[in-house]
Amino acid sequence: MTHKLLILSELADQYRTLVEEAQLPDLVIESAPTPEIDIVLGEPSRIKAALASLPALSWSQSIWAGVEPLLDPASRRNYILTNARGVFGRLMSEYILGYLLAHERKIFQRLEDQKNKRWDDSDTGTLRGKTIGLLGVGSIGADVARAAKFFGMNVRGYTWSSETSADVDKYFHGSDLLEFAHGLDYLVNILPNTKDTRKIINAELLNVLPPHALVINVGRGSAVDESALLEALNQNKIAGAVLDVFEKEPLPKDHPFWTTPNLLITFHTSAPSLPEDIAKIFIENYKLFIEGKPLKYQVDFEKGY
């Protein structure tokens, strides 16, 4: 049986080249939607826009980890949805540990000292012995935990049930959230967007953190109560925050985050979907697909991950 693939991405040419190089059997790559297309590889937002013109769709491979646009209950769900996993952990680890090191070693402060010709030979901090709390310890969280251990950090993990990472010193679940957060030096959110994770970083949680704590969000913007975080930063209840994701993206120009003290902003760029990484997932899943075997990284439409 011949399968027809449609690639929906701004990097479609790169994906096409990588897939063609794999010489996958019985696969034809189309350049536009047709009623016969049964496989789609691409960005969830573009896939959602094309669903109505893909009546034969049986499998959709997202190039992102997050698939929120395709979880709308009003949208079609009569196909297999797989997302990208196992490729973002090291990228996220670089981002998170980079900002932890910048904070402890006062890299941005040292740059200001240089600009102002101010000699400051005071000691900086170290990651060794600090405690990092990971909201979410899936494949990405496990990589972050491993990187944190390399620097001699204590690692706490908050999950719904699983305890699969040996690099986490102590796990917390359910109602243990505040106990998990108490005394953390660093709080890092890596959770997906679900009804249980929305505004999980709220005023109550932030009030438990010590004043020297730093909050980093690389999961989903919905996990943070933005008004509560604004208050915590403006009142110096915590030392700072690093945000890569937001409730509304792009962040509106009139949003107070742009000028909030001790807040560093990036633009949903902590772990890009690199075609060479995502293509490997698609190729592996395609081989399973034509053999009638379960695909890797299937998304439960109800759970959202």
Image: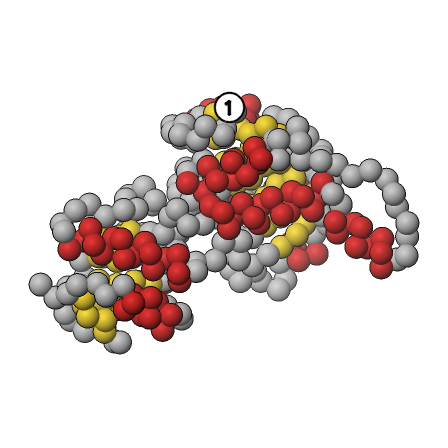
Would residue 85 be seen by someone viewing this image from the given angle?
yes
Q: Is residue 24 above or below residue 151?
A: below
Residue at the limit of the structure toward the left, as seen here: 1
As drawn, is 110 to the left or to the right of 168?
Answer: right
Report the residue marked by disc 1: 170
In percent of the image, x 52 and y 40: which residue is there?
144
Q: Please say if 8 is above or below 201.
A: below
How many labels sit on residues? 1
Q: Residue at x 32, y 41 (%)?
A: 303
Query: Which of the 4 quarters of the picture holds residue 148?
Result: top right
Q: Tell me residue 87's x, y (percent).
A: 42, 50
Closer to the camera, 22 or 31?
A: 22
Q: Position of residue 195 (x, y in %)?
A: 39, 41
Q: Residue 7: tell me if it is visible.
A: no
Q: On the image, which quarter does residue 117 sit in?
A: bottom right
Badge 1 crowding class, 10 Å Cα cut-off, few under 14, some 14 to 19, many 20 or more, is: some
Q: Nearer the viewer, residue 128 or 9?
A: 128
* Label 1: element kind: strand
Q: What is the quadrant of residue 36 in the picture?
A: bottom left
Q: Quadrant of the N terminus?
A: bottom left
Q: Position of residue 223 (x, y in %)?
A: 50, 43
In the displayed structure image, the side of residue 108 where residue 44 appears, left or right: left
Of 251 and 37, nearer the camera is 37
Q: What type is the residue that disc 1 sits on?
A: Lys
Q: Is residue 159 above or below residue 37?
A: above
Residue in view at x 39 percent, y 43 percent: 194
